[in-house]
Image (cartoon, rainbow, N blue to C red):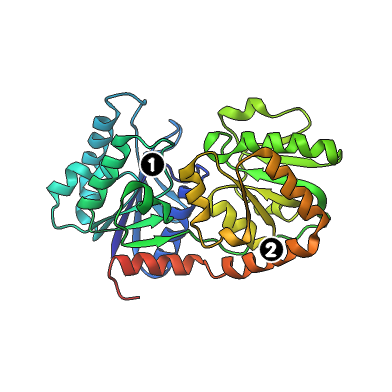
Amino acid sequence: MKIVFLCRLFAPHIGGVEKHVMQISKRLQEQGHDVVVITEQYQPSLPLHDTVEGIDVYRINKKKDDWFQKFRLWHGMWRLRSVLKSADIIHCHDVFFWYLPFRFLFPNKPVYTTFHGYEGFPIQKKAIFMRKISEKLSWGNICIGDFIPKWYGTKATAVSYGAAEEAFVSTEKRVKKESAVFFGRLDDLTGIRTYVNAYKLLKKEYPKFELLVIGDGEDKRILSKDIQHIGFQKYPETYLVVYHFVFVSGYLSILEALLAKRLVIAVYDNPMKEDYLKLAPFAKFIVIEKDPEKVAEQVAYYLNHPEEEKKLVDSGYQWAKKQTWKKMVDLYLSVWEIKK
């Protein structure tokens, strides 16, 4: 069977959705399916047709972000209409509007959508409208998180919180007790400002406390000189085994941290992000706070109560190790109503 995934960004770009599509694609191919990914050409140096880790990839050059970009994307999709026509399944990752005209050109072709994350808060009416259109015109959908049905009114075919695999990374370095690592985009959605402010408070009580920030973004300028900073890394688990606490607030990052047996400190700054975290089944295994003062307080508490930390970490690990990519692939197949 031929499956075509549509996603805004894909490898070599690093990100949660990119990893999700890659891992699902590789495992579907291992089962004998033919997988194609259609994505944006986010760098001019990337070829329009490529093979990435065995996955057939077509890239669309939308040139720039402006009012006409949707028409350039549709033009790029039109050039790939033979790929779409030959597909048995079309599956959109948040970008259903790319396929919108073709939904009517190929009315009987099965098309599905996975809704990842959200576009910011407060939610714009056009974002809710576009998701409702995507839901109504899709044959089924997967919502990554129960907050999506609550806040967008989406009637979910299935709900998931993502997947991850254990990555055993050998290291001779000892865990730095008074330390934390953050990885992700440096912007409002990841809570980097809250983490940085919490770090500054922790430094007053624990002068040797270290924070490593992995990633890049518009908020890079808020990092102080004593914060170690490196760009995006393909394998952040290399650092998870060295640093004590993990400062992350996204599903995939939380899963990876739980599998590394690290205590996760997640933060929110609006009621939707609060539900994003607190409605998740892993909420009882991590620390969820809003204010930097509370984050610093919780870190200090678990530094002084390792037995309580171990209970959370062990429980979180037992839950996370069941959230495999195989389980996620089975979910996709069940939504597509294909026998496993």
**Residue at position x 34%, y 47% in the image:** 152
Query: Residue 289, image x and y in percent?
Result: 62, 46
User: Helix, strand, or loop for circle 2?
Assistant: helix
Instruction: Look at label 2 and name its amino acid.
Output: Val
| Quarter in which the C terminus is drawn | bottom left
- Picture quadrant of residue 218: top right
Q: Is residue 297 above or below residue 335?
A: above
**Residue topped by disc 1:** 8
- For disc 2, the neighbor class at 10 Å (few under 14, some 14 to 19, many from 20) is many
Check the image and name the residue furthest to the right: 207
Check the image and name the residue furthest to the bottom: 339
**Residue at position x 63%, y 29% in the image:** 220
Label 1 and label 2: CA atoms lie apart by: 34 Å
Query: Residue 93, image x and y in percent?
Result: 36, 49
Q: Number of labelled discs?
A: 2
**Residue at position x 83%, y 35% in the image:** 204
Query: Residue 275, image x and y in percent?
Result: 48, 50
Give 221 or 81, whichever is nearer the viewer.
221
Q: Is residue 223 above or below residue 185?
A: above
Query: Residue 217, image x and y in percent?
Result: 57, 31
> Reading the chain from its start, which is encountered first: label 1 or label 2?
1
Q: Is residue 8 above or below residue 288?
A: above
Residue 313, numbered label: 2
- Picture quadrant of residue 61: top left
Instruction: Look at label 1 and name its amino acid.
Output: Arg
- For disc 1, the neighbor class at 10 Å (few under 14, some 14 to 19, many from 20) is some
In the shown orientation, is residue 181 left or right of residue 97?
A: right
User: Helix, strand, or loop for circle 1?
Assistant: loop
In the shown orientation, is residue 193 left or right of residue 327?
A: right
Q: Nearer the viewer, mark 1 or mark 2?
A: 2
